[in-house]
Image (cartoon, rainbow, N blue to C red):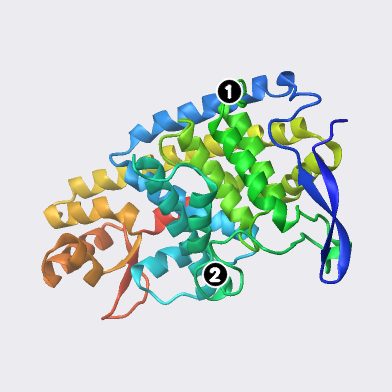
Amino acid sequence: MRSTGTYVTSSTSGEAVQAFVPHPLPPRDPALASASFVELNRAAELALARLSGVSGLVPSVDWLLYSAVRKEALLTSQIEGTQATLADLFDEEAGFPVRNTDDVEEVTNYLRAFRLVQENLRNPAGLPISVRLLSEAHGLLLDGARGTGKQPGALRRSQNWIGGTRPGNAVFVPPPAEHVAGLLADMERFIHGDASSTLPPLVKIALVHAQFETIHPFLDGNGRIGRLLIAALLEHWALLSEPLMYLSGYLKQHQAEYYRRLSNVRTDGDWEGWVSFFLEGVATAATDAERGIVTIASLVATDRRRLLEAPKAGPASYRLFELLPLMPRFTVERVRQKLGTSFPTASAAVKTLEDLGIVTELTGQKTNRSFSYQPYIALLTG
């Protein structure tokens, strides 16, 4: 059995605990067994390639990104216990009142953090994947009521622990605060250095995610930043040019196994078991996302055909229809603003789509009405 770290005595809340300090990546003594991942890696890479290819089925990749990034934001937050739904998110963006306002804020904060990382990676003058970039993303993630007192954007300066009611009965105690910066610097070197060049990119992503979760460098939000790091590395290593896959759906569905596999790396040195689980997750999530794109493309194509064949349809209703996947819930006023037309023109465009059964009115009122592209939302949430 390989050793993946050492234990040091740390003191927190008046208790002495054994904190785990991981060895730098990659796994050694022995090295990661390639036989454990070659086939799974090939299947996962193939699933990602198919997913990239199928995105050409829709006129605008923005449609797919709008829903995929929001699903990832929602699911990664749900793993941490938030109760917000996709419909809540669409309502909030449409300006409708929402329940769970704090939960919705957490999800929208994740979207802001994600966009910050993506913009930096795509800007030649932007930050590379680094401790600094992740810390800036963390600052956005914990911005707001629930992040107060959690040191947003700063590496922790105290000992934390996972599970249990106090440090002494914790499920896992991450490394002491004074080790965090050095461990993250090692991880950064692994991402950008030559030591990892013999391993396939997906395997490296699996290793980095587990290492980040073991270091647990922030007081809160480690899981979400660690999963955001997965999406960033998929782009960094050119495995997926757009974030079309929501891996957190798989991790949420297999949450107990997810945590068990990470734990087994620390306790039993079982890097192979974790990497296999991760690669299976990527293949499944990519295949699910591909299937979802085909279904959405089919729905939108069918509805567009109905609209084009409708005698009363005109340019404003066509333009509105093309916006629906980016604003599945809306008011006439929002349509007026988006189309840059008069209120009567916007209202007539909405009515055309309502008469065709493409959109549904939600309030039953004569004024201040709101509308929904319900079949599309049903596909996304199904």
The answer to which of 378 and 15 lies nearer the viewer is: 15
Q: Secondary structure at mark 2?
A: helix
Q: Is residue 354 above or below residue 57?
A: below
Whether residue 337 sits left or right of residue 113 in the image: it is left
CB within 8 Å, label 1 to label 2: no
* Amino acid type assigned to the residue bearing label 2 in the image: Asp
Whether residue 76 sits left or right of residue 311 in the image: it is right
The answer to which of 182 and 324 lies nearer the viewer is: 182
Where, quadrant-wise, is the N terminus in this rendering? top right
Of pointers 1 and 2, the one earlier in the residue sequence:
2
- The circle drawn on residue 197 is 1
- Whole-percent x, y for residue 68 in the image: 45, 48
Q: Is residue 312 visible?
A: no
Residue linked to disc 2: 103
Q: Is residue 357 above or below residue 105?
A: above
Q: Residue at x 36, y 41 (%)?
A: 122
- Whole-percent x, y for residue 107 in the image: 50, 62
Q: Is residue 132 visible?
A: yes
Whether residue 63 sits left or right of residue 323 in the image: it is right
Q: Residues within 10 Å of mark 1 (few under 14, many from 20)?
A: few
Q: CA distance from mark 1 to mark 2?
A: 40 Å
- Number of numbered tags placed on the structure image: 2
The answer to which of 304 and 251 lies nearer the viewer is: 251
* Amino acid type assigned to the residue bearing label 1 in the image: Ser
Whether residue 338 sits left or right of residue 244 in the image: it is left
Q: Residue at x 11, y 69 (%)?
A: 342
Q: Residue at x 63, y 56 (%)?
A: 222
Q: Secondary structure at mark 1?
A: loop
Q: Residue at x 15, y 54 (%)?
A: 313
Q: Residues within 10 Å of mark 2 (few under 14, many from 20)?
A: many
Quarter location, residue 343: bottom left
- Whole-percent x, y for residue 179 in the image: 71, 51
